[in-house]
């Protein structure tokens, strides 16, 4: 499975996006060990320096931590993870809202549509529950 | 690092290199981009003292040329430099007997990685496999710098993928790598720095991620900017895959 | 030093692949000439016994005089001449440019020069000794094939000219001459190598310069050799002094060739 990166956005940011997605969807569990930088470079066919940069940024943001002589691990800080999830959803909501805000439709109809859509989908690792 | 300082090269009347200045730092992958004949191979040959410069200086870790340079820099040219009568095993032994930097273990690993048979005579190998042998012989040396001239030329797509993997692996980790290539798409995600050349001069040199961050442009976008006055000459590059 | 030996071993291996078949071929032809002569002798003997024609004497002269023999002797020297050019040009021409690898070896580049040169020395010694041995064997076989009363013992130099010249040159009678002749040849080889490197460094201009240099070597030598013959000279030089001057010239030219080649290999040669 090779994710397609685009050539115009910084690769390290695209990589962080990829990790963010994995994090918020619980595919990377708290405390889970991450593949090594080299493995990731090989997997995505990108420069290991880029992977290093992404890792450094994520360490800075405390998304991951690295103990000496051990592979990096996802943070165990569940509060932080919640925050990341919330930020992710917030941004999606912003995009959603700005794309419909010119439309003449009632608030109730919008929430009804949102609820309907949410209940339609089936997420293997839980997803959005009521 | 490898430094090229005001390098000029003349072939009779023709000026092939006209004041080239750049560096190849350790730990980064740089690529020299330019059409055929613009001087890329000449630059690599100069770094390895396989051709004399007309003017200018080349320093490797601050030193001028001496035989010990070949324990610091490895060159994989776009030419057949093995003896076709030799078996792969013999070529490897040859390397081992002259280079202290020869890493036998890594060479064996690469044989497996490239799926090559030690006992095959080099003259019986396909073009792609010869390219792999060249890579093996060049990369199994524990050197600080690796130069590659058109590593993807004339290679089928599956071999290309294998060769691409080399750049993301431990084989070039921490080394200063300089490659020349036309295949921009193959290297777009792999290189740290790009050096654009034309007519013996360097037109632009930049850090690839930085350009993405500040200008939102890919290597090919910058190439369009830089080479547009010569737009009839960029048909070599595979823009349609963008 | 070890690396030089390894390179020498490598070059020697490449040369032997040519030299050994050439020596074998030469030996085969020599034996053919030998048995041809013996057959001839037997025919003569038969005719002589049957028709009472007096029998002529046979000697090594007859073996070496047959047209085939000089041909056999010349095979190996011709190979040397061919290989003295081939050993360099093979690295650049053809599908494989091995010169890249040679120039990128972490050794002084003169190792390449000397490993090729010394290969010739070793190969030459091998060829010389083998031929010596062959002569001995041929001699013994021949002597035993001829009745003593018809056999004249002659050494390998008692042969018809111009073959005599070849024999005296390749197999000199004194060790002094041996050193001189083969030293001359070796210095000529180094001069040739230098000329080749000039061509490889400077193309056409280099080729012209190289040819001039190579010819100049011979001119210099023959000038010294002819010093006594020039009547206008105010001095008379003893032949032994000429000999010394020639020797010194040969050594000097070896050094000069090596120095020029060193500079070319280090700074000017191109793949």
Image (cartoon, helix red, strand yellow):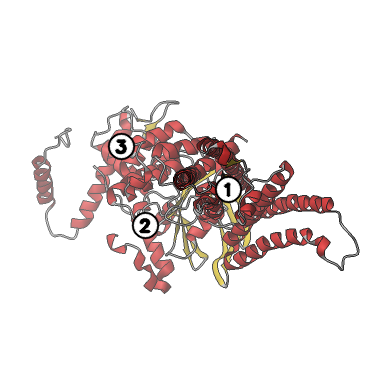
B203 vs B167, left or right, is right
The subunit letter for the residue under badge 3 reads: A
Label 2's element?
Answer: helix
Label 1's element?
Answer: helix
Q: Which residue is mark 1?
A: C61
Q: Is residue C39 above or below residue A99?
A: above
Mark 3 and mark 2 residues within 8 Å of each other at the beta carbon: no
x 18%, y 60%: residue:
A102
Q: Which mark is residue A106?
A: none
- Name the mark nearer the viewer: 1 or 2: 1
- For disc 1, the neighbor class at 10 Å (few under 14, some 14 to 19, many from 20) is some
Res. B23 in view: no
Q: Which residue is mark 3?
A: A83
Taking the view exactly as shown, the residue that stands out farthest to the front is C52
Mark 1 and mark 2 residues within 8 Å of each other at the beta carbon: no
A58 vs C16, left or right, is left
Q: Is residue B144 above or below residue A65?
A: below
Taking the view exactly as shown, the residue that stands out farthest to the right is C234
Res. B189 in view: yes
The subunit letter for the residue under badge 2 reads: B
State the image coordinates of residue C207 (x, y, percent, origin top left): 60, 65
Give the CA distance from mark 1 to mark 3.
108 Å
Q: Which residue is mark 2?
A: B184
Q: Are marks 3 and 2 on the same chain?
A: no
Label 3's element?
Answer: helix
> Which corner quadrant of the image does residue B220 belong to?
bottom left
The subunit letter for the residue under badge 1 reads: C
B157 vs B24, left or right, is left
Q: Are marks 1 and 3 on the same chain?
A: no
């Amino acid at each position: 499975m090779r994710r397609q990166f685009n050539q115009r956005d910084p690769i390290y940011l695209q990589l962080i996006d990829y990790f963010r997605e994995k994090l918020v969807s619980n595919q990377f569990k708290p405390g889970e060990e991450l593949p090594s930088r080299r493995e990731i470079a090989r997997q995505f066919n990108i420069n290991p320096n880029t992977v290093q940069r992404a890792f450094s940024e994520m360490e800075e943001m405390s998304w991951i931590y690295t103990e000496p002589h051990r592979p990096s691990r996802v943070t165990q800080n569940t509060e932080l993870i919640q925050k990341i999830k919330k930020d992710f959803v917030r941004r999606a909501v912003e995009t959603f809202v700005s794309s419909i805000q010119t439309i003449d439709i009632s608030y109730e109809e919008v929430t009804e549509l949102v609820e309907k859509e949410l209940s339609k989908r089936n997420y293997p690792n839980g997803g959005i529950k009521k | 690092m490898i430094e090229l300082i005001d390098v000029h090269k003349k072939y009779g009347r023709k000026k092939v290199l006209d004041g080239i200045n750049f560096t190849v730092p350790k730990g980064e992958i740089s690529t020299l981009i330019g059409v055929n004949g613009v001087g890329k191979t000449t630059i690599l040959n100069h770094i390895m003292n396989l051709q004399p410069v007309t003017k200018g200086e080349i320093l490797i870790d601050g030193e001028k040329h001496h035989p010990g340079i070949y324990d610091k820099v490895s060159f994989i040219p776009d030419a057949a430099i093995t003896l076709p009568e030799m078996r792969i095993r013999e070529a490897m032994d040859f390397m081992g007997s002259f280079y202290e930097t020869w890493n036998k273990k890594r060479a064996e690993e690469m044989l497996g990685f490239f799926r090559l048979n030690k006992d095959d005579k080099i003259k019986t190998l396909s073009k792609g496999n010869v390219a792999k042998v060249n890579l093996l012989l060049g990369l199994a040396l524990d050197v600080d710098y690796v130069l590659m001239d058109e590593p993807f030329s004339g290679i089928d797509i599956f071999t290309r993928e294998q060769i691409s993997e080399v750049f993301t692996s431990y084989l070039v980790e921490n080394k200063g790598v300089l490659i020349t290539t036309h295949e921009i798409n193959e290297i777009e995600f792999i290189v740290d720095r790009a050096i654009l050349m034309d007519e013996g001069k360097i037109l632009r040199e930049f850090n690839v991620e930085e350009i993405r961050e500040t200008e939102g442009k890919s290597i090919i976008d910058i190439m369009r900017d830089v080479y547009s006055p010569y737009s009839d000459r960029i048909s070599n590059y595979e823009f349609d895959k963008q | 030093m070890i690396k030089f030996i390894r390179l020498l071993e490598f070059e020697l291996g490449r040369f032997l692949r040519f030299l050994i078949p050439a020596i074998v071929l030469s030996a085969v032809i020599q034996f053919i000439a030998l048995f041809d002569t013996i057959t001839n002798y037997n025919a003569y003997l038969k005719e002589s016994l049957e028709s009472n024609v007096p029998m002529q004497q046979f000697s090594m002269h007859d073996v070496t005089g047959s047209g085939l023999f000089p041909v056999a002797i010349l095979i190996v020297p011709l190979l040397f001449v061919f290989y003295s050019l081939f050993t360099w040009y093979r690295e650049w021409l053809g599908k494989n440019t091995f010169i890249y690898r040679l120039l990128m070896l972490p050794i002084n580049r003169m190792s390449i020069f000397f490993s090729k040169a010394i290969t010739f020395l070793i190969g030459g010694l091998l060829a010389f000794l083998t031929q010596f041995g062959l002569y001995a064997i041929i001699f013994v076989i021949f002597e035993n094939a001829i009745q003593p009363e018809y056999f004249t013992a002659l050494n390998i130099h008692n042969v018809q000219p111009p073959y005599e010249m070849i024999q005296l040159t390749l197999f000199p009678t004194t060790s002094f001459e041996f050193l001189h002749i083969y030293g001359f040849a070796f210095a000529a080889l180094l001069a040739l190598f230098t000329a080749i490197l000039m061509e490889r460094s400077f193309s056409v201009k280099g080729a012209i310069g190289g040819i001039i240099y190579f010819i100049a070597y011979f001119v210099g030598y023959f000038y010294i050799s002819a010093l006594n013959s020039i009547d206008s000279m105010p001095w008379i030089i003893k032949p032994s002094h000429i000999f010394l001057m020639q020797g010194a010239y040969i050594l000097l030219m070896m050094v000069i060739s090596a120095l020029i080649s060193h500079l070319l290999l280090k700074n000017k040669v191109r793949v």
